[in-house]
């Protein structure tokens, strides 16, 4: 059995397809060396098989021999020897699993240094200080990672040395000082391990390899794999590579290069470099770097070689690459390459341009696959510019984009300040419909309570406005809030990042989101790919929302919530009238008033979505949501007293108040105990549709019953709806109306077969399904429990962001399959917040859903994700593996 | 095809096994006639096949001919002719489906009467009045049921006749008056149907048969079948039987007879009769009946014949029978027989005595099968005595038994009144732990709010005390309550029936429940049958409860709720201390105090259940349950102000308050955010167990984690428990401890396979599983929504009483099977309220559970139901049908 492969080993297939064996880093190094034959410092990879064998039964037989052979070859190739006191070979040792994994041992540099070879290094570089600094860094890194000596013990010795010499900066310590530090470090190692720091490079190497193997099973690595659902059996590879130096003189240098500009996507080499420096100097920013273009003058031959390599890399990988390189005494070495990170603008531009690049010839499907939701978000919303900042606190990333403004603590104050021309951020414990005017003028919304589907979050996403919600550390007290010792008062400027949840004191620079032309091109391709597979609709409650959704490419409305129509300033009193009604006549009269306003609302929505389906959900929330707060009224009663109306409202609010409103008198249950309500809503809807049809429009109406648990319930609700449709038949016959139900209780999912018998469509309400399946009240859990659960790996994701695949996902799959078994043509959609989440969309596609519905600003992301789900399925089918659909 | 069978038809098998064909009533009549050859008035049954054929394609070919033939035979047998003006044959027409079904046409009597034959009846009975009264009743019944004439139209005519003659009682109308009523009724029929009342008996019969067929599809019958999950395709049979008369003179009579005393179970004929009377006179109670024993003197031959028939019936049916008989001119006719209803005492006595009766030889298994939960309840709790009463309102039957006492509206007032020697009923909107002292002294508890698992209900059942909960019509106002116009003030006597939910003004007589010896015998047999199949444990939180449960036969504790231990007057302040703790030290100190008291609690419980398993559930409810009411404190704050402690409590109560506490920070989630809590509880438990073991006891401890949703969560919680066990290892090693989890979220049920890997047992929390699967908050749904849902057939049962077989039941079955697949020996139990419900117990047995756990007073019922579930499975297996397990 072979355990070790040189980078230039001739594998029978592309090394990039051998990540299982070589790990990601090893595969890339082998690809560059053996396939592209780039100038890569030689080295070898100890395979994951060796690691697995080590975990099963200790150091594998034969491994030492293989490593020795490879070392001999390496010394020969580099014409240097490990431990040579005049010109030593130094190596780096790095872990490299199939998947990138924080929590494992990362890198030991300069392995091979000892009391003798450090002198050789000094000679070769002509820099004593550098040599001893390298040695002390090696002992520190090796001591901490391989020998388990506490890291801060080294810091103490180092600080003591600075004190002794009276210097403040590390850089001010001279070679002699550092030699003394080396001595101190070696004593520390002796003290903690009971043995001298190993001077034999062979021993150093063996210990480092074992440390990499062992780090695979460190608690952090285990926790990470559990969270990411990665197998614990894969093991990691170990890469041993000869070190080269960019700091041996002015014929040396080091840099970072991109094959295209990662910010704009513009063609041409891009990057930074430093003459006579090491890699970490480029990254640390201690010296000002030079643009890569300067290399053309300073090292013209190297520059030409590098540009040629960039071209070969792009042609080979068919993507933009990020590289690290070093020039050692005029010779170019490529240290690393990987597909480069990029901004949204760059991603879109490169994806489109590469389709017409003769050497790359990306297909539109490949272009679509390279764009992420974050890329689209970043061109749709302003973003925090790059740079460091002090984060005051983090809440939930509730609606993407950055917002900067003065903090105001009430909607009225925010509105007044905005009227004065100020930019404002509205800060509230939580928002309610009464805050709408303050939210409308704000640059961003920050709440201390509530989760991803709280009022603030849902409204902000609907408006494409940044929001950070559930920032539980914030304590609001009148017109200021505090976080620990920091107090932010009314008028102080704060910045919030709704993409990360960060809250920053002061103004953070924003990069304005601009939608490039390639956005339209890529989404057009996405639409072609997903056509006939998965449609994308929007959740929209008003004509304006519907119109906006349509410009974003929505193919209908999957959820029009009628309760939002009940909350307008002019409607709330009428809704309360209905709730308070003591006689059927009074109730009837209130319903009649509501019918008129509802009709007007429906008319606007149907007009904006003319020709496309509009799913109208009949009233869902518990009635007490339309009544005032009990506690506030009780206090008023005890202090200044209540008016007769207020007293009635208090009594009603007490009567309708529920212990667990989520699981209370809402949805179709309201219909059962107030039978006139749903009939009124359907009449209003049919009248609006009739008016649209009379005006030459094409209304397509889907009436949706919420919170169903059984066939009997839906059959009854259907009879009300059909009754109301029948009543309106003289003006609205011929209009396309279907009747369906939300599937949002676990029971409805289980009984989907029966329920389908009386449904034209199902729409999965995955928010509520998640709440009930997990017993997670979104209002309560996201702030208090979600954080600890995510941190401790008890949940892989926030299940309100990305659907819980194993639990809620099973209910969705099961309901889809039972529903379709009973009624093959049953239309299936989803209208929870998950409808805009790429990972969830993939699950919905796999479950056979016909459409997803999400907030208008998420529609482009859903179009992209839907296409990617289709492509993934095709890939799986094409691969012909067990994964086919 | 044969559609019609005479009662004396020689069927190839026992008619009782042909209920599918003959219906229940027809089968019984055929059994008595053709098998037992009892003197039954002849007649014939039109089969369910005829009905099905009629429903499919109208009146079946050949049916008329068959009916005609049977009529000819009937006339011959009775030596009378239909419509004969001198001595007419009269018949009854009755529906009779396989299952007894309210909502279908029941009975038309005296068919065959017309303007001529009424005179013949008068002549034969020598009673003109009776003849015309029979005729007018026939027209009224036939008109209403067969011809669809509104029933109150007949009433108007009848009342008008009474007014005209100036009489108040029906009985005061003479024969002539009744003849006039007949005339009025005929005009009414003409008016409503446009045709004369049919005079031809053949036409009458044909119409009556069609009316029975059609009644199968009446809306009420359909709704009933839907609710009871009966097939709509069965159809009903029609029974046509010659009428006999017990009112033709003093050689006539009629009565109701039981083969044994249905109240006491004593051997020997028992019943009532009347000389010269019709059946309805016996039932109506207008004349004082004579005991059946008097018959021995008055009609000695008939009496001997009847007693002999009783003997034959008992030997044949192997049970106590209820019969109706008529003596017509000295001849005995048996009109009906069926298995008789009986009291609990009688049921137990008869079941046991019939095992030693040489002619009956009931097996113990059969004896067990004949006892119902109601039978046991009635001997365990006092009951409302028979008799009519005016029911003020109905609430939920929350805890069985009757209670009578003076109404008091606060626990303090109730306790004071009880101290004065009064019997009291505690009336509250809802109860909380602060009401315990008032509940303890009450004869019964009545609440306006809350469901079957509300505090009042759970506590009352635990104590075996009657309770009616969620009586929503009650409006409590200070020291009185009103229902409509009735006001009940403090001190007024009311009676409540916790078995039916009835609330009655004034004192209802109670029959005291006494436990007969046969109770023990029958439950002993039940235990033998269920041994090794399904164990029965109790839910008990204190030593007293545990001891009581053990006397009722509990084989362990399936649920010991530790939160109830937190609510004692001495503990609550310490619990609050822990919640308010600002520093880890303060929290630690509070936990330490709690540990001491918890240990004492555990010690009592373990002692009472020595040698049997005790499942201790770690703290489950949200912390705000231990904090005072926010609204009340807010009002105090706004009026008189708060002390510093109160202000802290208010802040804490606000902080911990949740929108949906059911789905909030409770169960294992509490453990995650307050890690010291569970460790403290386990330490206390292990110390108690060690103390028991040291004292020579045998503690068997099961530690249960509530509200789990994933494997990771349980693995983490398990590590805390194991840590605490390890800490206590020096005193408690060798003690039998297992660690398991509640399965009470739908996700836990779905992921049971994974969760089982880290669980020693599952206990299904079917209360919460029901709440989450159906989205039914028990606190909110039972009062407001459950009533309408049950009335409208949207739910077959209250799913908190009897498990929702199709939804929650599927989750239980699925979790049991996934859990056992992953870990074959996994112990499975249930500790929700369903653990004491017979129908649910049957499902749990079928799902393979090892035990059920219920409140102590339900333990006998659970033992019985568990045995019956085992017997049902054996029966199904024995039958060898598709139903085998």
Image (tube, coloured by chain):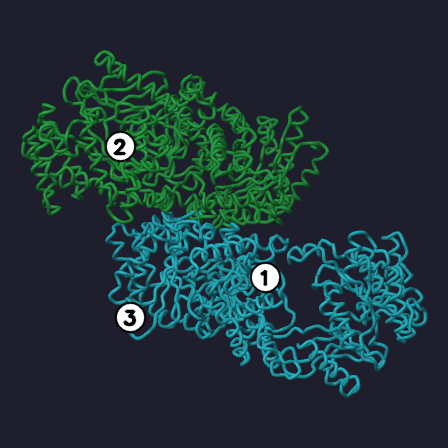
Chain colours: A cyan, B green
> Residue A394: which disc?
1
Q: Are marks 1 and 3 on the same chain?
A: yes
Q: Which residue is mark 2?
A: B6
Nearest the camera: A561 or A645? A561
Residue A220 screen position, x and y as percent:
70, 55
Residue at image x 44%, y 59%? Answer: A824
Q: CA distance from mark 2 to mark 3?
A: 66 Å
Helix, strand or loop for disc 3? helix
**Of marks 1 and 2, the one in the foreground:** 2
Q: Residues within 10 Å of mark 3 (few under 14, many from 20)?
A: some
Give the letter of the chain under mark 3.
Answer: A
Give the quadrant of residue B80: top left
Earlier sequence position, callout 1 versus callout 3: 1
Q: Is residue A540 visible?
A: yes
A464 vs B231, left or right, is: right
> Residue A691: which disc?
3
**Of marks 1 and 3, the one in the foreground:** 3
Nearest the camera: B242 or A502? B242
Q: Are marks 2 and 3 on the same chain?
A: no
Residue A242 screen position, x and y as percent:
84, 70
Please state, as top left, top right, bottom left or bottom right, where the N terminus of chain B lies in the image.
top left
Residue B258 screen position, x and y as percent:
31, 21
Helix, strand or loop for disc 1? strand
> Residue A359: which disc?
none
Q: Is residue A464 visible?
A: no
**Numbered disc total:** 3
Q: CA distance from mark 1 to mark 3?
A: 49 Å
**Of marks 2 and 3, the one in the foreground:** 2
Nearest the camera: A447 or A215? A215
C-beta proximity under 8 Å, tags 2 and 3: no
B566 vs A115, left or right, is: left
Give the letter of the chain under mark 2.
Answer: B
């Amino acid at each position: 059995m072979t355990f070790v492969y040189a980078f230039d080993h001739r594998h029978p297939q592309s090394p990039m397809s051998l990540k299982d064996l070589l790990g990601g880093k090893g595969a890339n190094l082998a690809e560059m060396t053996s396939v592209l034959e780039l100038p890569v410092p030689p080295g070898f990879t100890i395979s994951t098989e060796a690691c697995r064998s080590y975990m099963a039964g200790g150091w594998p037989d034969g491994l030492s021999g293989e490593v020795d052979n490879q070392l001999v070859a390496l010394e020969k190739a580099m014409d240097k020897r490990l431990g040579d006191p005049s010109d030593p070979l130094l190596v780096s040792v790095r872990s490299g699993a199939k998947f990138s994994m924080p929590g494992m041992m990362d890198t030991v540099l300069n392995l091979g240094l000892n009391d003798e070879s450090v002198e050789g290094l000094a000679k070769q570089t002509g820099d004593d200080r550098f040599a001893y600094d390298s040695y002390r860094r090696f002992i520190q890194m090796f001591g901490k990672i391989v020998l388990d000596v506490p890291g801060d013990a080294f810091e103490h010795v180092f600080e003591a040395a600075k004190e002794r010499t009276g210097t403040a900066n590390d850089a001010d310590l001279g070679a002699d000082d550092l030699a003394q530090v080396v001595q101190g470090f070696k004593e520390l190692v002796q003290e903690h391990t009971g043995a001298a720091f190993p001077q034999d490079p062979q021993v150093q190497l063996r210990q480092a390899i074992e440390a990499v193997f062992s780090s695979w099973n460190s608690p952090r690595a285990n926790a990470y794999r559990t969270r990411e659902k990665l197998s614990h059996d894969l093991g990691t590879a170990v890469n041993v590579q000869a070190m080269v130096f960019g700091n041996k003189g002015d014929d040396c240098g080091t840099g970072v290069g991109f094959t295209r500009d990662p910010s704009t996507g513009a063609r041409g080499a891009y990057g930074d470099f430093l003459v006579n420096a090491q890699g970490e100097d480029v990254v640390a920013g201690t010296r000002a770097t030079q643009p890569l273009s300067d290399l053309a003058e300073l090292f013209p031959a190297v520059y030409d070689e590098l540009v040629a390599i960039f071209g070969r890399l792009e042609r080979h990988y068919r993507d933009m690459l990020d590289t690290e390189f070093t020039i050692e005494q005029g010779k170019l070495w490529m240290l690393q390459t990987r597909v480069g990170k990029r901004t949204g603008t760059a991603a879109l531009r490169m994806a489109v341009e590469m389709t017409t690049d003769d050497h790359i010839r990306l297909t539109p499907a490949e272009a679509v696959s390279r764009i992420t939701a974050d890329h689209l978000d970043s061109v749709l919303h302003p973003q925090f510019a790059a740079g460091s900042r002090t984060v005051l606190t983090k809440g939930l990333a509730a609606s993407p984009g950055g917002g900067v403004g003065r903090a105001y603590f009430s909607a009225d104050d925010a509105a007044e300040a905005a009227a004065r021309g100020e930019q404002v951020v509205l800060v509230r414990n939580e928002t309610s419909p009464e805050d709408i005017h303050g939210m409308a003028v704000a640059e961003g919304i920050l709440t201390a309570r509530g989760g991803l589907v709280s009022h603030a979050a849902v409204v902000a996403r609907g408006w494409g406005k940044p929001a950070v919600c559930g920032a539980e550390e914030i304590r609001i007290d009148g017109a200021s809030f505090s976080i620990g010792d920091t107090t932010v008062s009314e008028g102080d400027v704060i910045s919030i990042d709704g993409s990360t949840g960060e809250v920053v004191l002061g103004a953070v620079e924003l990069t304005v989101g601009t939608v490039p032309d390639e956005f339209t091109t890529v989404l057009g391709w996405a639409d072609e790919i997903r056509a006939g597979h998965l449609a994308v609709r929007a959740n929209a409650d008003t004509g304006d929302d519907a119109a906006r959704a349509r410009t974003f490419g929505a193919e209908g409305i999957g959820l029009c919530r009628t309760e939002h129509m009940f909350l307008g300033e002019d409607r709330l009193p009428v809704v309360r009238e209905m709730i308070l009604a003591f006689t059927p006549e009074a109730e009837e009269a209130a319903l009649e008033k509501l019918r008129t306003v509802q009709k007007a609302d429906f008319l606007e929505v149907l007009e904006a979505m003319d020709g496309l389906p509009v799913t109208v959900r009949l009233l869902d929330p518990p009635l007490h949501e339309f009544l005032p707060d009990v506690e506030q009224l009780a206090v008023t009663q005890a202090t200044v007293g209540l008016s007769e109306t207020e007293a009635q409202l208090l009594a009603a609010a007490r009567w309708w108040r529920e212990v667990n409103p989520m699981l209370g008198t809402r949805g179709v249950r309201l219909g059962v105990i107030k039978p006139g309500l749903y009939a009124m809503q359907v009449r209003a809807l049919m009248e609006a549709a009739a008016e649209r049809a009379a005006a030459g429009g094409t209304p397509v109406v889907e009436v949706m019953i919420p919170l169903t648990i059984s066939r009997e319930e839906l059959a009854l609700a259907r009879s009300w709806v059909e009754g109301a449709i029948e009543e309106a038949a003289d003006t609205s016959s011929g209009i396309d109306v279907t009747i369906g139900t939300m599937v949002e209780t676990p029971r409805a999912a289980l009984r989907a077969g029966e329920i389908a018998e009386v449904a034209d469509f199902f729409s999965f309400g995955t928010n509520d399904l998640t709440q009930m399946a997990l017993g997670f009240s979104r209002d309560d859990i996201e702030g208090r429990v979600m954080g600890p659960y995510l941190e401790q790996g008890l949940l892989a994701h926030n299940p309100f962001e990305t659907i819980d695949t194993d639990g809620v996902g099973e209910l969705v799959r099961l309901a889809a399959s039972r529903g379709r078994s009973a009624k093959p043509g049953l239309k299936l959609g989803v209208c929870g917040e998950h409808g805009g989440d790429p990972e969830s969309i993939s699950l919905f596609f796999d479950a056979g859903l016909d459409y997803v519905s999400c907030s208008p600003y998420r529609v482009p992301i859903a179009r992209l994700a839907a296409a990617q789900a289709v492509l993934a399925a095709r890939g799986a089918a094409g691969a012909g593996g067990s994964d086919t659909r």
